[in-house]
């Protein structure tokens, strides 16, 4: 138990160090996990453990649940496949519903999309459109090795029927940066046209058009257990800070 806590705390400090060193929205960092089970792109949890080897995060807030989650894992065995899962509370099929995944391949930020930035957009549960940055905006490109499927299904995080998206992208085909390891910037969002009051729900809650405020996919770290959420990492970070303060106070106590 103590060893596990130490390893997890090391992961916390790794996340904090990497986030400080590279462009990223503060507080939105994940560690890249390599899959032990390949995801089946069918818009549902094909098995109860299909995504348990991924890094799972809440779309909003710090709780994994019915408000939406997303997950990411990597298969670099041959084609650098990036696998994404997004679960939305949405159960209505609207023509303007939207999923968006943006990747800043070189994680070099910038307030507008550049040539190493890619946007994957799915509209109306039917249409995939891909974009690359021009330095000032997004430009449409042909589909580059992206496969996807969404469907109404249930999961361990939401027992009601809701839309689940599964998507795979071959980062080796997305740009010249594709053969590079992390860090990569990442932005994930969903929009439910039947709930306009909620607007676009995004991780981080920023803009797809501003890579300097994307989240961060950091390097793979084996000390993070399967299915670990950023909420748990944040809790550990708080514990680490509290423990550090306590130890400092303890050391500074005068001798009697």
Image: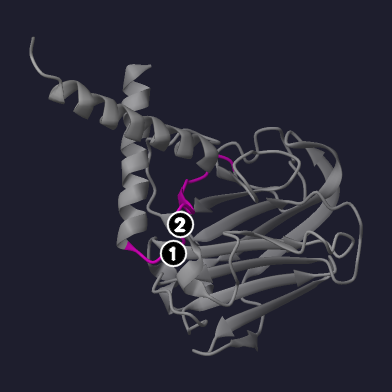
Q: Is residue 121 above or below residue 38?
A: below
What label does residue 68 carry, if any?
A: none
CA neighbours of label 1 inside 10 A, class few (<14), some (14 to 19), many (20+): many
**Quick one: 213 or 88, which is closer to the camera?**
213
Secondary structure of residue under mark 2: strand
Give the percent coordinates (x, y) of residue 64: 65, 39
Q: Disc 2 and disc 1: Cα gap in Å?
A: 5 Å
Query: Is residue 36 covered in magenta?
Result: yes
Give the percent coordinates (x, y) of residue 207: 60, 71
What label does residue 217 carry, if any?
A: 2
Q: Is residue 142 above or below residue 50?
A: below
Task: Write down the quadrant of residue 50 in the picture.
Answer: top right
Report the magenta residues as a range. Answer: 22-37
The residue sitting at 47% across, 65% down in the picture is 185
Give the percent coordinates (x, y) of residue 41: 72, 53
**Quick one: 219 or 10, which is closer to the camera?**
10
Is residue 234 toward the left or the right of residue 16 in the image? right
Task: Write down the quadrant of residue 37 in the picture.
Answer: top right
**Label 2–label 1 contact, CB within 8 A:** yes
Which residue was labeled with disc 1?
Answer: 184
Secondary structure of residue under mark 1: strand
Query: Is residue 243 covered in magenta?
Result: no
The residue sitting at 44% across, 64% down in the picture is 184
The residue sitting at 15% across, 20% down in the picture is 253
Is residue 211 toward the left or the right of residue 207 in the image? left
Is residue 169 toward the left or the right of residue 183 in the image? right
Task: Write down the quadrant of residue 54 in the picture.
Answer: top right
- Locate the N terminus and report the quarter of the image it occupies: top left
């Amino acid at each position: 138990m103590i060893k596990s806590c130490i390893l997890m705390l090391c992961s916390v400090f790794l996340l904090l160090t990497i986030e400080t060193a590279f462009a990223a929205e503060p507080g939105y960092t994940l560690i890249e996990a390599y899959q032990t089970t390949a995801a089946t792109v069918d818009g549902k949890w094909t098995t109860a453990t299909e995504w348990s080897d991924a890094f799972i995060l809440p779309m909003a807030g710090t709780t994994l649940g019915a408000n939406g989650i997303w997950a990411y894992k990597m298969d670099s065995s041959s084609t650098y496949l990036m696998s994404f899962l997004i679960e939305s509370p949405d159960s209505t099929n609207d023509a303007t519903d939207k999923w968006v995944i943006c990747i800043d391949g070189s994680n070099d930020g910038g307030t507008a999309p550049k040539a190493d930035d890619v946007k994957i957009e799915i509209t109306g549960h039917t249409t995939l459109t891909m974009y690359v940055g021009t330095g000032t905006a997004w430009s449409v490109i042909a589909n580059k090795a992206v496969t996807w499927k969404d469907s109404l299904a249930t999961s361990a995080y939401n027992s009601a029927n809701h839309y689940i998206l599964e998507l795979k992208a071959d980062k080796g085909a997305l740009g010249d940066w594709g053969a590079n390891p992390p860090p990569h910037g990442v932005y994930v969002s969903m929009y439910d046209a039947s709930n306009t009051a909620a607007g676009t729900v995004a991780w981080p809650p920023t803009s797809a058009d501003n890579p300097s405020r994307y989240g961060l996919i950091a390097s793979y770290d084996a000390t993070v257990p399967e299915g670990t959420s950023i909420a748990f990492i944040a809790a550990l970070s708080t514990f680490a800070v509290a423990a550090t303060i306590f130890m400092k106070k303890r050391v500074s106590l005068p001798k009697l």
